[in-house]
Amino acid sequence: MNENNYYLKKSKAVLREVRKSVIGKDDVICKVYMAIIAGGHVLLDDIPGVGKTTMAHAFANALGLKYNRIQFTPDVMPSDITGFSMYNRQTGKFEFKQGAAMCNLLLADEINRTSPKTQSALLQIMEESKVTVDGNTYELPDPFVVIATQNPIGSIGTQKLPESQLDRFMIKLSMGYPQIEDEVAIMKSRLENGKNTQFSACVLEKGDIEGIREEVAGIYVDDSIYEYVAKIAAKTRSRENIIQGVSPRGSIA
């Protein structure tokens, strides 16, 4: 089978599996998947209860990725994300205890409810794909993807992420409320399955994500398209009605 056809079929299977858990949000699902295979991170800005956590878990299962979730609160420390060194009395040595970031897909839930120091620790990891603890550096698993959620600004206990930190995300999305027929389907599914909601099944083989990413990276892009994107970015930097224009990182994305 041609590799292009193989990866296309696998990608369609991933989307099909995620749709089983996340009903009526095809556009959001496709955009999140595009960000993942492009090597980016995703920020979901929406109210609680619309399926953000469910979607992250569904993608982790469908893609066969190790999944961790960390609920951000004011008392969450950077070491909860990066890990820390603990002294072992039996061996007389310090041992590294992994933090939540040691996974393939990390759901950073309600990122705007924690301290700026903890936010910065996560966003640095997103940029470097590694953690440094007590002078020792540990590479994160590959692939490493963060799907972060935040509640709308103005909700109790939230604080706005700086623009410099928002820039680390490839895409920012809002899921929104479901349509009436979709909400009916969601309620029926919950009542029929109870709390034992079945998340999507794994459809990718080992190495498939790397293969898909290589296929995407191999797509030819003409210089005229690069120039077109650069011109759009430049226009956003000179408009008076735009507070902050697109950065070079945004152009790359």
Image: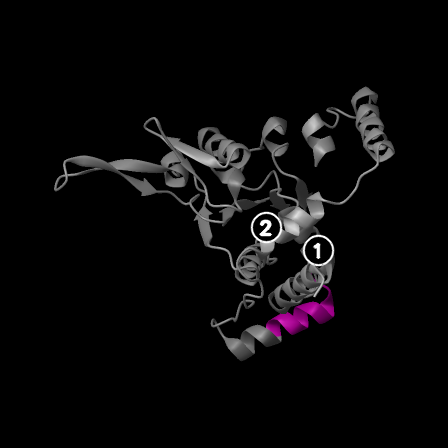
Q: Position of residue 226 (x, y in %)?
A: 81, 32
Q: Where is residue 82, by image quadrant?
A: top left
On screen, residue 123 above or below 58:
above
Identify the residue shown where x is 28% and y is 35%.
85
Q: Secondary structure at mark 2?
A: helix
> Rounded to the nearest whole Å, what is the CA distance between mark 1 and mark 2?
18 Å
Q: Tell me, yes or no, whether the highlighted magenta stretch contains residue 181.
A: yes
On screen, residue 198 above or below 28:
below
Q: Label 1 belongs to which residue?
A: 30
Q: Which residues are magenta?
A: 178-187
Q: Position of residue 120 (x, y in %)?
A: 49, 30
Q: Label 2 belongs to which residue?
A: 210
Binning the other alpha carbons within 10 Å of mark 1 as few (below 14), some (14 to 19) or many (20 upward) gives some
**Image-based side of 248 in relation to 229, left or right:** left
Q: Where is residue 176, by image quadrant?
A: bottom right
In the foreground, 75 or 90: 90
Q: Are marks 1 and 2 in contact (CB under 8 Å)?
A: no
Which amino acid type is marked by label 1? Cys
Visible residue check, residue 185: yes
On screen, residue 10 above or below 88:
below
Identify the residue shown where x is 13% and y is 39%.
89
